[in-house]
Amino acid sequence: MIFLFLDMRGQLDFSAPERQMPFVVAKALTLTAKDAQEAVRQHIRDTFVIRKKSGGFESSIAVRSATKTNLVSEVYTMAAFAALQQTGGIRKPLRGRLAIPDYSDIRQVSRHKPRMMGGLFEMRTKSGKEFLAERRGKDFKILYHLNKTAQVDKKLNMLETVIKTVGSNFAFRFNRAVKEL
């Protein structure tokens, strides 16, 4: 789970119409968080191959709005795998092995999951590497490498995207909210 907070408590001077300023700040924080949410979603569309057209990872990027009493807005995701995509690192299976697709481009990976039927079988090379393969007539094709761990590269950049969006949009959103008073 990843949470990013846009927190303005103690950083603003509420002078002019004091009673309206908390509303203005809350509105600016929430709108900035929504801008950041859209920027993260765009980054996901540009970086990842998304097979599920509705729902899924892109729609898991959510915003918790700021209020007049809680001047904190959050951009977050509950997607369990997102933390490893944000930081990079080693992925380990809960039990058994990871089935890593054999491909040179992610777009070559089919949606089917490995099943031990229909000509699929496990094989081991002399060096000890394990594979899941499929029979195709007299030949076979390696579909998955079976590994105990896998290196996950840092791809998500959610933190960086939100920080950049906040830096470029908050002042604009704040000034616009003040003018709408």
Image (cartoon, rainbow, N blue to C red):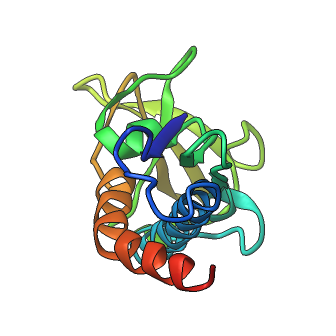
Q: Nearer the viewer, residue 103 or 17?
A: 17
The residue positioned 72% from the left and 36% from the top of the image is 116
Q: Pick out the residue farthest to the left.
A: 127
Q: Is residue 135 left or right of residue 126?
A: right
> Which of the 4 image quarters holds residue 168?
bottom left
Q: Is residue 155 left or right of residue 80?
A: left
Query: In this rendering, does residue 105 appear at all?
Result: no
Q: Nearer the viewer, residue 12 or 65?
A: 12
Q: Nearer the viewer, residue 10 or 161?
A: 10
Q: Is residue 86 left or right of residue 109?
A: left
The residue positioned 43% from the left and 79% from the top of the image is 175
**Position above or below: 133 against 30:** above
**Position above or below: 44 against 132:** below
Q: Is residue 105 left or right of residue 20?
A: left
Query: In this rendering, does residue 177 appear at all?
Result: yes
Give residue 126's position: percent from left, percent from top: 26, 26
> Which of the 4 image quarters holds residue 62?
bottom right
Give residue 56's position: percent from left, percent from top: 70, 59
Give residue 84's position: percent from left, percent from top: 40, 37
Q: Pick out the residue farthest to the top.
A: 95
- Quadrant for the C terminus, please: bottom right
Q: Nearer the viewer, residue 153 or 76?
A: 76
Q: How many badges with numbers are in the image? A: 0
**Position above or below: 108 against 20:** below
Give residue 23's position: percent from left, percent from top: 64, 60
The residue positioned 55% from the left and 77% from the top of the image is 177
- Quadrant for the N terminus, please: top right
